[in-house]
Image (cartoon, helix red, strand yellow):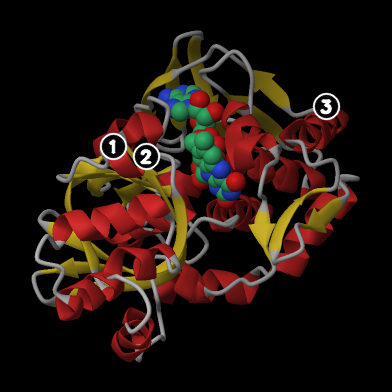
């Protein structure tokens, strides 16, 4: 039977899914419905326009749900993704570490090969077409801003609230799918402290997120101070672990357990301020001294290992790269089909899956889209 497969949302997951289905079943009618005037708009923003499309250092631990991801990653590796893109003619390279980018270092190249393949395969793309309602009887009735469509198979790849607006979550709720509460992720963090005197400074450090005395997460990397908060890749990654009333503590000298004795030795020749000026950028020295007017060395060393900031929130969805929360994965099967509605599939960021920065979120979007495509194709 020549099935009609409708894919709702033309982002990374939706396009990867459409291509996979049509490559395996050229006789199927595959259509992408996209609310924007073009497909793949978010992809153009990724990796500062360079599109960090995956990461060679792949593993379930980089995601919020390692159990679910462990199964997905056993079915679909980074090599599988590289083969998918090689087939499309995309040249890929790493950035000297494990992050993977298009060789051209521009996201438009990724969109170019996806568009070429969509056109070559004859996948229908209908833009400026927002899905407003879906109902299922024998078939799906998909109500859109451009009229009603009928389909045997529907795939929901509507993405997230990060720098976008989507009603995809509400569409799923009408089918009885549970949506885990939505929060901005990979987003700069707002702090109670005014950080004007540190604004623009970047420091490499070890950072921990604490809830009272419990450490929720620890990671190493670079922080960028903003006037009222913390940004930089490390802060974005920390934002995935935040709850209310958290503290962030920066260890500016990780592993230097003898700092007290080291500074004591320097103090034989210099005063404290000059000693600190040999250790840290000026802006941080004055922040530490401001916090320690009594110049107690023990407390200063404590601050050098635990420079604390009180979290009061984040910069919100407008500044977020991803959305935490989404459709509960316990309500889908391992092939991403809905446990609630036969022939409905979910893929990409609409699901309650979030990954670290470094290509993990796009990897999940491509991977889940391709795995849905395989499931619809019957393997
Ligand atoms: C600034 C920025 C930088 C990022 N950089 C990276 C990076 O370098 N590496 C990385 O791995 N991840 C990155 N991400 C995250 C990554 O872009 C997403 O995780 C990924 O695009 C999710 O893919 P998706 O297909 O699920 O959703 P999307 O790519 O968001 O696609 C969803 C599509 O569905 C459409 N849609 C929504 N609702 C409807 C509807 N009702 N009807 C019709 N169409 C609808 C939307 O318009 C959209 O085109 C970045 C995100 C942002 C915002």
What residue does disc 1 label? Answer: 196
Indicate the quadrant containing the N terminus: top left, top right, bottom left or bottom right. top right
Indicate the quadrant containing the C terminus: top left, top right, bottom left or bottom right. bottom right
What residue does disc 2 label? Answer: 199
Q: Position of residue 187 (x, y in %)?
A: 37, 44
Query: Disc 3 on helix, strand or loop?
Result: helix
Residue toward you, 78 or 171: 78
**Up-down: is 302 above or below 140?**
below
Label 1–label 2 contact, CB within 8 A: yes
Q: What residue do we see at 52% from left, 62% from top?
A: 335
How far separated are the C-alphas under marks 3 and 2? 47 Å
Question: Would residue 11 be seen by someone viewing this image from the given angle?
Answer: no
Q: Position of residue 336 (x, y in %)?
A: 48, 57
Residue toward you, 151 or 370: 370
Label 1 crowd (10 A; few <14 / some 14-19 / many >=20)? few
Residue 119 shows which numbered tag? 3
How far separated are the C-alphas under marks 1 and 2? 5 Å
User: In the figure, is residue 3 to the left or right of 219?
Assistant: right
Q: What residue do we see at 58% from left, 53% from top?
A: 372
Query: Disc 2 on helix, strand or loop?
Result: loop
Label 3 crowd (10 A; few <14 / some 14-19 / many >=20)? few
Q: What residue do we see at 35% from left, 91% from top?
A: 258
Q: Position of residue 320 (x, y in %)?
A: 39, 39
Label 2 crowd (10 A; few <14 / some 14-19 / many >=20)? some
Q: Quadrant of residue 371?
A: bottom right
């Amino acid at each position: 039977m020549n099935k009609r497969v409708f894919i709702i949302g033309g982002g990374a997951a939706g396009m990867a899914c459409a291509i996979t289905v049509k490559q395996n079943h050229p006789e199927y009618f595959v259509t992408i419905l996209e609310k924007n005037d073009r497909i793949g708009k978010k992809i153009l923003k990724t990796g500062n326009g360079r599109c960090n499309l995956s990461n060679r250092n792949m593993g379930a631990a980089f995601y919020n749900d390692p159990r679910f991801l462990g199964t997905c990653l056993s079915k679909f590796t980074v090599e599988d993704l590289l083969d998918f893109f090689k087939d499309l003619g995309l040249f890929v390279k790493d950035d000297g570490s494990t992050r993977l980018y298009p060789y051209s270092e521009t996201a438009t190249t990724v969109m170019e090969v996806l568009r070429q393949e969509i056109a070559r395969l004859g996948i229908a793309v209908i833009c400026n077409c927002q899905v407003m309602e879906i109902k299922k009887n024998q078939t799906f009735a998909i109500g859109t801003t451009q009229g009603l469509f009928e389909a045997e198979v529907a795939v929901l790849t509507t993405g997230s609230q990060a720098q976008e607006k989507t009603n995809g979550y509400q569409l799923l709720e009408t089918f009885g799918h549970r949506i885990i509460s939505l929060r901005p992720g990979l987003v700069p963090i707002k702090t109670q402290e005014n950080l004007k005197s540190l604004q623009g400074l970047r420091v490499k450090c070890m950072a921990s997120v604490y809830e009272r005395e419990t450490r929720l997460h620890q990671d190493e990397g670079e922080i960028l101070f903003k006037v009222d908060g913390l940004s930089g890749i490390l802060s974005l990654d920390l934002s995935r672990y935040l709850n209310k009333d958290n503290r962030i503590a920066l260890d500016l000298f990780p592993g230097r357990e003898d700092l007290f004795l080291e500074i004591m030795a320097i103090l034989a020749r210099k005063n404290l301020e000059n000693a600190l000026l040999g250790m840290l950028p000026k802006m941080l020295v004055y922040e530490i001294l401001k916090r320690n007017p009594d110049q107690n060395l023990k407390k200063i060393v404590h601050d050098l290992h635990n420079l604390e900031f009180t979290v009061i929130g984040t910069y919100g969805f407008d500044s977020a790269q991803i959305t935490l929360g989404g459709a509960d994965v316990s309500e889908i099967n391992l092939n991403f089909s809905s446990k609630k509605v036969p022939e409905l599939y979910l893929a990409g960021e609409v699901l309650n899956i979030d990954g670290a920065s470094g290509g993990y979120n796009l990897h999940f979007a491509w991977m889940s889209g391709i795995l849905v495509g395989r499931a619809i194709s019957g393997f």
